[in-house]
Amino acid sequence: MRPFAYLFVATSVLSGCVADTADDTGPAGGKGDGSSCSRAAGEVDRCFGFHPIADLEAVAVAAPVVQTDGKILVFGTAQDRASATPRRPVPFVRRLLANGKPDSTFTADLPIPYAPPYTGSIFQPTTLALRPDGRMIVAGSFGDSYAKQLSVQQLLPSGARDPASRSGSFWPPSSLLGWTSDAVVNKVLLEQDGSYYLVGTTECIAAFTCDTRAMFVAHFDATGTLDASFGTSGYALIKSGRHTRVIDAVRFGDATFVLGVESEPYFLHGHDTSFNRVVVGKVTASGALDASFATAGVFSWSAPGSQLGTIPQAFQVRPDGSITIATQLPANQIVALTSDGKTVTPHEYRADNGVRFARFARDGSLFAEVTSYPIAAFGRFALDGTSDSTFTKAVIEVPDVPTGTVFLGATAVEQSDAWLVNGHLFMGADAMPESQMMLFRLWK
């Protein structure tokens, strides 16, 4: 593997692509016809249409979602440069064709920003799940900088609001949480019968007298009604701590596994910092913590000898029920657990403190952004921590963007033949910076 690969600006037409009869509407130069393109492992698909969303900036990067027909949904919160108040954030869901070009037939009907109960309150999408019939569940939070409540919006395949759904915003039941909550949905897990689980984080903010967060799982039926028989009043709490938040969640069998991080602030070398721990919780079908898993249903781990602990990035539950976790700074490791969460085997997969993002592939390997700002490079690693020499790291060419543009952060979703990466571009780093979201593909 090449040791590093740097982002650089290219304004020339990308080579190796058959010309498309229609010009792209975005500012980038990918033609998106998909033909006559190099397919070397780890290289950029230079015929996929690179499309920064031109009318939005300061975009929060989220993992794209691919429909069964190959169309791509991108979503999040951004600032609308075309509005009268361009610095205010707005929620968005956009759809691209399979070749990366904008889909003009799709318009998302999301809640109107700045609605009551608070001036400045907005819907902030953080996760999106697709039903088999093409309808969407878009979830996150609704509120402002002072308080946020859970929010779930359901859309038709066209992007219009689903009139048959129970879309809206709501507070978690105080009888379960015991405090006023600042809450966000981090993941939606769909079931075959149309019911779904919301997994997220809630924070104690009552009268500013406490500083406690908890990870939760809630269950809803196919109509969007809270299942009061699940857990306590429809919710199950997994872990409470000073600073606990959800990273990811999966369903395995009839159980819900939740990956999170718990941080404990402390003073080190004259600076406020945090000691971080990996947290995995297992919730049963009834909404109880599984007492047979780890310690009372919750596994916690931090890198031995590290002053800062470790931060989880991704996990997977294997067919035998065992769990594999990828962690980042300051100890980049793959942590293998037994199915009961009681045996831990860590493997280091990189030691340069540069992992910013990781996802497990279907074949069990780990796909990761492995270098630090402003470098854009990706690697693949086996479960024993060794790198895959057949997967090269690629230079990311971004056509038609200002000098000084840098690549910062990524997330991705696996396709059959490639990784679809959602990158964050900071445009014109030497001047007043603005940021855009840009999709590109890396061949497997």
Image: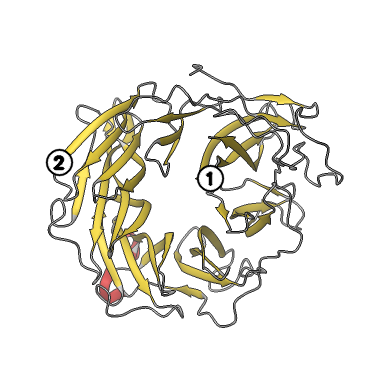
Quarter location, residue 232 = bottom left
- Crowding at dot 1, Cα within 10 Å, few <14 / some 14-19 / many 20+, comes out as few
User: Is residue 178 among the parts visible in the rendering?
Assistant: no
The correct choice, above or below, for 145 with respect to 408 in the image is below
Please tell me whether mark 1 sits on a helix, a strand or a loop.
Answer: loop
291 with respect to 15 (left or right): left
The Cα–Cα distance between marks 2 and 1, rounded to whole angstroms, is 33 Å
* Residue at left offset 75%, top offset 57%: 83
Quarter location, residue 120 = bottom right
User: Is residue 62 among the parts visible in the rendering?
Assistant: yes
Depth check, mark 2 against mark 1: the one in front is 1
Task: Using the image, tell me which numbered label, if any, was put on residue 393.
Answer: none
Lower position in the chain sequence, tag 2 or tag 1: 2
Task: Using the image, tell me which numbered label, if any, was put on residue 416.
Answer: 1
Q: Position of residue 31 (x, y in %)?
A: 77, 40
Quarter location, residue 360 = top left
Q: Position of residue 380 (x, y in %)?
A: 44, 30
**How is colour applied across the structure in the image?**
secondary structure
- Crowding at dot 2, Cα within 10 Å, few <14 / some 14-19 / many 20+, comes out as few
Check contact, mark 2 vs mark 1: CB within 8 A: no
Q: Which residue appears farthest toward the top when viewing the image?
A: 3
Task: Work out whether residue 364 or residue 409 is closer to the camera in this orientation and state it.
Answer: 364
Q: Position of residue 387 (x, y in %)?
A: 39, 24
The amino acid type found where label 1 is placed reads: Ser
118 with respect to 436 (left or right): left
* Residue at left offset 80%, top offset 35%: 18
Please tell me whether mark 2 sits on a helix, a strand or a loop.
Answer: loop
The correct choice, above or below, for 124 with respect to 353 in the image is below
Query: How many dots with numbers?
Result: 2
Write down the residue under mark 2: 343
